[in-house]
Image: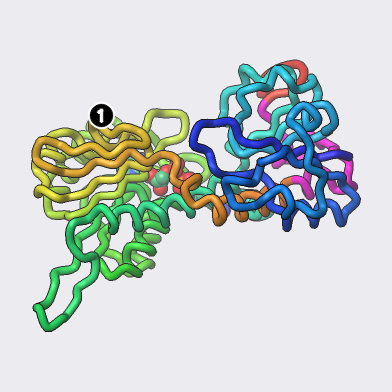
Amino acid sequence: SVIGVLRETAAGERRVALTPDVARRLSDRGVKVLVETGAGRMSFFDDAAYTAAVVVTRDEIYAGSDVLLCVRRPDDLAAARPGQILVGLLGLDPNGLNGVTAISLDRLPRTLSRAQAMDALTSQANVAGYKAALIAAEACPGFFPMLMTAAGTTRPAQVLVLGAGVAGLQAIATARRLGDQVTGYDVRDAARADIASTGAAVLDVAAPSAEAAGGYARDLTEDEAGAQSQGLAAAIPRFDVVITTAKVPGAPAPLLVPAAALAAMRPGSVVIDLAAGNVAGSVAGARTLTGNEVTVIGAPDLASTVPVAASTAYARNLLALLTHLMPHGEPQLDLDDEITRAVLLSDREGARP
Ligand code: NAD
């Protein structure tokens, strides 16, 4: 069968779905790989690096591929043929897919151990959490670590990470390596234990564990959310840096740093919102300064800013998924299989349940 790699069309997207290395591995299995001209350029993989693939135009990719690979949903799906298979982080909305058989990694059953190698949400969140800590260090007007020099000893920065899933835990680990003092917080007991296991402090905000199916958080009740905001509002002004990553599947990201909490922070403090919605007034992709000179950074797409690491991990996730979906080189969607059934977002007939 033929696999085609599309160049990403989303503005500012720098990742590519397949690296030359993974293209070679697929080709070694007898799969023909087509790569769109320039697909890997923003990840520093030139066309010439795809020695095991054929570099062609976008029209040729759409015309000649059985399986199309992307990171984010292409904006020209009208060019795809009904029944053609499209694999990517396609989101959860089955509409607008033009009859393609859409395989969305956003729907992977992540707690299944045999799905772990395919888990692109985890690999990309890991990259994002790492970059968040670096951006925080760069935006912070003081040192992160305690430094003892002839000019005196510096106070280590105090960093608070709200939401300790994959991205939050990597932000905690990376910030700790930079030498600051890190405190973490999450609504799930399991995540609080994960924070403690990194050696970071766990913020003590009284709340029951709010765990739902699949290891995700559930939406808090109004009372719980009220108690949480009070606890957080009291704690947040102590910190130089706050990194937020809190998400709830199927619900808007919870507001954890309201305007009043920002107003109570010291000038020069930095707040980074990875969830696009945890911080009052955060604007995706922008740095803004509050009236009291707190820098607020909206950063929902950080994986794309570390394109080599993100693409390399994503391509390996795709290799594992394709190996599962195409055990003999031809796509065979076995709907009795738990993983295949879960990731199938829509097909020729429209949305899948
Ligand atoms: P996510 O991006 O959906 O959420 C990030 C974090 O925000 C979560 O830890 C969540 O508990 C937290 N959160 C939600 N509401 C909050 C609130 N009001 N206040 C504070 N924190 C809040 O989650 P994710 O990082 O994609 O994954 C979360 C969990 O999913 C993992 O920690 C794990 O339990 C499960 N998971 C399991 C596997 C696996 O078993 N291989 C892989 C990936 C994820």
Residue lying at the far bottom in this picture: please name it. Answer: 150
Residue assigned mark 1? 222
In this orientation, which residue lies closer to the viewer: 308 or 201?
Answer: 308
Figure quadrant of the N terminus: top right
Q: Which residues are magenta?
A: 322-345
Taking the image as shown, residue 241 lies to the left or right of residue 346, namely left
* Residue 328 part of the magenta segment: yes
On the image, which quarter does residue 79 sit in? top right
Q: Is residue 126 left or right of residue 6?
A: left
Residue at the image point whose x is 25% and y is 52% from the top: 139
Along the viewing direction, whichever of 176 and 162 lies nearer the viewer: 176
The image shows residue 148, relative to residue 160, as above or below, that is below
Q: Residue at x 50, y 40 (%)?
A: 213
Q: Is residue 107 visible?
A: no
Q: Secondary structure at mark 1?
A: helix
User: Where does residue 59 sit, x and y in percent of width and height?
Assistant: 77, 26
Residue at (90% x, 47% y) in the render:
328
> Residue drawn at (47%, 47%), measured in percent from left and top?
305
The x and y percentages for residue 323 are 79, 49
Residue type, numbered disc 1: Glu
Q: Is 291 located above or below residue 40 in the figure? A: above
Q: Is residue 260 left or right of residue 31?
A: left
Q: Number of marks in the image?
A: 1
**Side of 2 relative to 282 (left or right):** right
**Is 61 situated above or below 96?**
below
| x, y percent for residue 71 | 61, 39
* Residue 348 in sight from this viewpoint: yes
Residue 94 in magenta? no
- Badge 1: residue crowd in 10 Å (few <14, some 14–19, many ≥20): few
The quadrant where residue 108 appears: top right
Query: Which quadrant holds the C terminus?
Result: top right
